[in-house]
Image (cartoon, grey):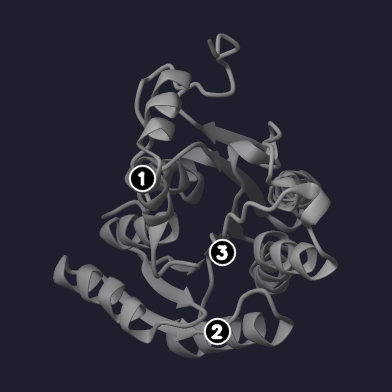
Amino acid sequence: MNALSNKVAIVTGSTRGIGKAIAIRFARDGAKVVINGSQSIEAAKSVISEIEKNGGSACYIIADASTPAGVKNIIKKSLETYHQLDIVVCAVGKHECINALYTSVEDWERIINTNLTSTFLTCISAAKIMKKQKYGKIITISSKMGIVGSEGSMAYCTAKAGVIMLTKVLGVEFAKYGIQVNCIAPGVTATKPTFDLFENSPEIEKRMNKRIPLNRIAKPEEIAAAAFFLATKDSNYITGTTIIVDGGWIANSDYF
């Protein structure tokens, strides 16, 4: 039997990038997976096709996880389809670079809603279901930029730091219900936005690789491996913590 057999997992923001890799990994290890994105049905269908091709089971729900109505829809339809909820991964996120002095209130609210409010709403809604069964695994996705600041990313860094603290508080509050809440803080990862950045600025790729002790950026599957560990019984004595998967970036003070 696979490690996640008979488990149902919702992965928000799973039509692309890290969320997609996590959904595919969970399905490979036996979970029934709910794919979520806010817009592209075709992208969701593509993830499901890949999962089903490898013998897994999945469905998709197009809804905006940064709104109460969207999260309510995700939870409701997931339960209607699979009748249980064991694991939730909050992988909705988008990095936007805006200098602090030019960040409008609208920019701030959009970035916070996407990267922090979506996680808050999903965690609370999932926990209300998990509390009744006295079991659940909630995994949030922060970033190394929630731990170290980055010029031009004030709102994003603030949101991702908030995810880490939200995880700590919920890990403490939900422990009595048998719910574990843990966080992953990825470093630079090989997703489309990263490749677009490298294509436009090859020098940035060189600088990043030099900054990372392992001398390369992460594969999405390597972030998914950490999520898999947190979703299994092997992590049953871990809650309220953050696993940094950054190739040694934060540990490295020798930038130059």
Query: What residue is at 31 percent from the left and 63 percent from the top?
Result: 27
**Disc 3 target residue:** 92
Residue 101 left/right relative to 131: right
Residue 187 place in picture, x, y as percent: 50, 36
Quadrant in which residue 2 is drawn = bottom left
**Disc 1 target residue:** 190
Say whether disc 2 or disc 3 marks the residue closer to the N-terminus.
2
Viewer-proximal residue, 3 or 25? Answer: 25
Residue 103 place in picture, x, y as percent: 78, 58
Q: Which mark is residue 101?
A: none
Crowding near the residue tagged with mark 1, few <14, some 14–19, many ≥20 C-alpha atoms within 10 Å: some
Kindly report which numbered mark, 2 or 1, lies closer to the viewer in this rendering.
Answer: 1
Viewer-proximal residue, 206 or 174? Answer: 206
Residue 160 place in picture, x, y as percent: 69, 48
Quarter of the figure with the N terminus = bottom left
Crowding near the residue tagged with mark 3, few <14, some 14–19, many ≥20 C-alpha atoms within 10 Å: many
Quadrant in which residue 54 is drawn = bottom left
Disc 3 residue type (three-letter): Val
Query: What residue is at 65 percent from the left and 50 percent from the top?
Result: 180
Tell me the element at label 1: loop
Say whether disc 3 or disc 1 marks the residue closer to the N-terminus.
3
Q: Which mark is residue 63?
A: 2
